[in-house]
Amino acid sequence: MSDTREHWDAIFTQKSDDEMSWFQAVPTTSLELLAQWSTPDDPLIDIGAGNGRLVDHLIERGWRDVTLLDVSHEALDAVRRRLSPSVTAVTYETCDIREWSPSRRYRAWHDRAVFHFLVSASDQRHYVRTATDSLERGAILIIATFSPSGPTHCSGLPVARHDADEIAELFAPHFEVVASREEDHTTPSKSVQSFAWNVLRRR
Ligand SMILES: C[S@@+](CC[C@H](N)C(=O)[O-])C[C@H]1O[C@@H](n2cnc3c(N)ncnc32)[C@H](O)[C@@H]1O
């Protein structure tokens, strides 16, 4: 088993929702941006979905084709156990995004707090290539990373912090940034983390 998978499986086995700094019962910004920039008919992939509640809210809003990708089997298993067996709209991909190749195309890509764990330029470039290959022209990519004033580490791992200009540069020439915002996320233990949200369109 890879170190990355072992690391995240241990977190999802040992911690409750409230002990995970990124936890949100209602992922408001994700839902707002998805409502603004895509529709429930769009096949969506959530990168590093964890055991997050976004999928529950998407199903409730009528999304019919949602893929959850995560390196942690434990995280995706928790989602599988939580969702009703009658939910057929969800596909699970247990995989490291650095090693994954798409077997189909999507119209929407969502990543909250995953890309920033890719600290090397080669991993970042590989991620951009994967996103490019996974998305149809005109598709939307929503990405939230720690901003330059956000934390330097998360879950014991170093992170790379980005502003909108850096994201635009990293994802050019295949994507253009169509919206950006900064947001302070209050963790369950009440500390504040600055996130940079960017919405990009696949050219
Ligand atoms: C900070 S959590 C965010 C979870 C979720 N996106 C949310 O907002 O609730 C980071 C997630 O990314 C996953 N992850 C970390 N590195 C990954 C990688 N290289 N490939 C796929 N998933 C990864 C972890 O297992 C974890 O679920």
Image (cartoon, rainbow, N blue to C red):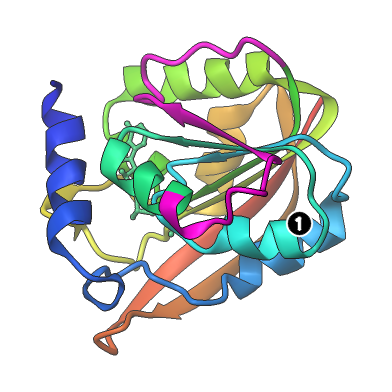
Camera-side residue of 55 and 199: 55
Q: Residue at x 30, y 71 (%)?
A: 17
Question: Which quarter shows the C terminus?
Answer: top right
Q: Residue at x 25, y 64 (%)?
A: 151
Q: Which residues are magenta?
A: 81-104
Camera-side residue of 46 and 66: 66
Whether residue 158 is in magenta: the answer is no
From the top left corner, tell me how far across and down residue 200 is, in percent.
72, 41
Some atom of ligand 1 lies within 8 Å of the CB belonging to the residue at label 1? no
Q: Residue at x 20, y 44 (%)?
A: 8
From the top left corner, tell me how far across and down residue 124 is, in percent.
40, 26
The image quarter containing residue 7 is top left
Q: Is residue 116 above or below residue 96?
A: below
Q: Main secondary structure of the magenta part?
A: loop
Whether residue 101 is in magenta: the answer is yes
* Residue 84 left/right relative to 179: left
The image quarter containing residue 57 is bottom right
Question: Which quarter shows the N terminus?
Answer: top left
**Within the displayed image, which quadrant is ligand 1 positioned in?**
top left
* Residue 141 left/right relative to 39: left
Residue type at the position of mark 1: Leu
Residue under pointer 1: 34
Q: Is residue 100 above or below residue 153?
A: above
